[in-house]
Structures are given as structure tokens and as C-alpha cells.
Image: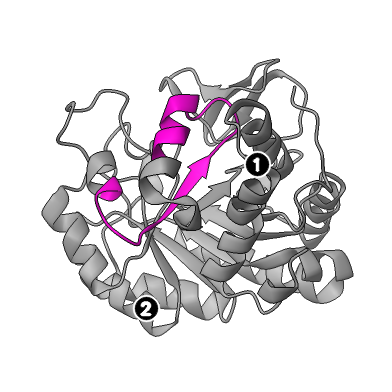
Amino acid sequence: MITNNMNSYGTLIDLQVNGYGGIDFSAQDLTVEQVVYVCQLLQSKGTSRFLATLVSSPVELYERNLATIKEAMQEDEIAGRLIAGFHIEGPFISEKDGARGAHDKRFICKPDKKMLKCILEAGRPLVRMLTIAPELTGIEDIIAMAKDENIIISMGHTLADASQIERAIEKGASCVTHLGNGIPLMLHRTDNPIFVFLAQAGLTIMLITDGHHLPIPFIRTVIKTCGIDNIVVTSDSAPLAGMPPGSYVSLGGEVVLEPDGRLYIPSQGCLAGSSACIAECADYLSLYVDLSKEEIKQITSNNPMRLIGLSDYNDAS
């Protein structure tokens, strides 16, 4: 287990937190008290601000849970301070195995402007980021709606080809959700979305550096290729992050959390998000990727704050 240096990197901003301590932001029975509890836990782990992330779900759940999280922010000072907004990851992503990752296939759907309108109305003005798959028919309308709301459009959980990715960028997509993950284990050696994303100038690339999602040479290659100013580290912490090792029922089935922190779905052979928080991801970069404290601060604080336009960006310590 990595030892947290919670105050070593300044303000730690995490743009992808699905839950923590057994609490799932996409659960049907999410309560205000649970949201507050997650915020208390994350604050104790060194997280300064984060985006509460909801995965592919029915529209009614988005409406209910976004309202619940907003209520928690209004009622509790810690929640109001830590939650910087929402990351809607799905439901307009690839339904294909591998690309969909741990998302429940039942809730992945075709681009639906009416559904997105409902989500935006429920989350307004706090929806900061939307993850979509560029290959879906009708996704350009979704990108346009999100862009009109000043929402960051990120591409992920996708098997898009070069022309589809380039078209999404032309329409307003500017970010990539957890590059190297949300994609099948076996890919064409050269013709695949990872290389297409790396070839695009100016994209913000998000990486999960928990020690399980990506090997060290991949992390180093992406940083060297894209430049430190274009990298954002996220934890992608799962609801089971912070829990003891064991077998759990989560994401609609069995999920195993191993003693070393690896969290996976045995039936699918894929990871089920991360068991780490953003401080642990920062420590991993320091210990194994040989980044300086200033470089780590850049990709865990300055870059994510700038990306989502936090008002206190210039005050980052």
C-alpha cells in the first residue's frame, strides 16, 4: 500500500470519483448523509476538491441522485466545499464488451437529446464534464448541447476510429477519459483509438495512476508525448475504494478487492474502477514514475482546476 503524503502536492483535485467507503453515487438509494460521509472520508485522505461521478444509469436515477448530491452540498459545509460539480460518465458510450468497462450494459443507450436535457436540468449549474463515445450516431447533437452549457466533452469507453474522433474534436470534444482504460485488452497494434488520441494536439488526457490500471512505461510515454500541461490524473475511485479486501456485490454483480488494491469483476475479467484516492495516485507518480513534486502538482492540481474552470485556480498552493 502506498503511503499518503497528503500535504505534499498542494490542492489535490480529482475529476472522477464514483464513490468511496462503500457508498456509490449511482446507487438507487443514495442519501444526503452518505454523500456527506464520502466527503468526510475523502477530506481525511487528502482530496481537496472532486467531481462526483455518475456512471451509465436510467434518467430517473440521474435526476434523483444529482438532486441528492446538490442537497448535501447545501446542507453540509464539507460537501459544499469538496464537491466541485458533476462528471456524467455515460450513458452515451460504447455498449461493446471491453469498451464499456464496468458500466452496466442495460443502461447504456443511444444519444438522446431529451435525456441529456433532463440530466442537465437536474444537475445545472454543476455539470462540469460529460464522457461520450464519438462513434455513436447522433453524438454530434449531444456534443453541441453540452458545449452550449460550457461542459467539458470528454471521449472515453469508445472504439471510435480516427475520422470519428477527429469529427468529435471539431465539434467541441477536448478531453479523453482515462486513456488506456475503457477499451478492450486486445487491440490492433497500430490502428486503435489510443494512438489516434495521442496524435491529436491539444487534447487533455486523463490517466488513472493507481498502480493497477496502467503500466509505468505507458504513463511515461503519454506524458512525454502529450506534455505535462495536457495531463490530468484522476483516481476513478470506485464505491468500494477504502473498503477492506474481499468479495462484494457491486455494479450489478460480484466484485473482488484484492489485498494489493486491485479491484476487478471476475465474470468480465475487467477492472471495476480504482480502490485508490487522488493522494495515492500522486504518491504512485512520485515513487514509480519519477515525476518531481512540481510536475505532480501540475497534473493533480493546476491542470484539473484550469480544465473545469474552478474560480480558485490561481489560489492553488
**Dot 2 alpha-carbon crowd within 10 angstroms: few under 14, some 14 to 19, many 20 or more:** some
On the image, the x and y values in percent for residue 163 come to 12, 56
Q: Secondary structure at mark 1?
A: loop
Quadrant of the snapshot with the N terminus: top right
Residue at 22% of width from left, 27% of height from top? 187
**CB-based contact (under 8 Å), mark 1 and mark 2:** no
Dot 1 or dot 2, earlier in sequence = 2
Residue 174 lies, with reference to residue 281, above or below; the image says below
Which residue bears the numbered disc 2? 147
- Mark 1 vs mark 2: give the one in front: 1
* Left or right: 199 in relation to 315: left
> What mark, if any, has residue 127 been given in the picture?
none
* Left or right: 20 in relation to 250: right
Q: CA distance from mark 1 to mark 2?
A: 35 Å
Q: Quadrant of residue 12?
A: bottom right
Which residues are the magenta region?
197-222
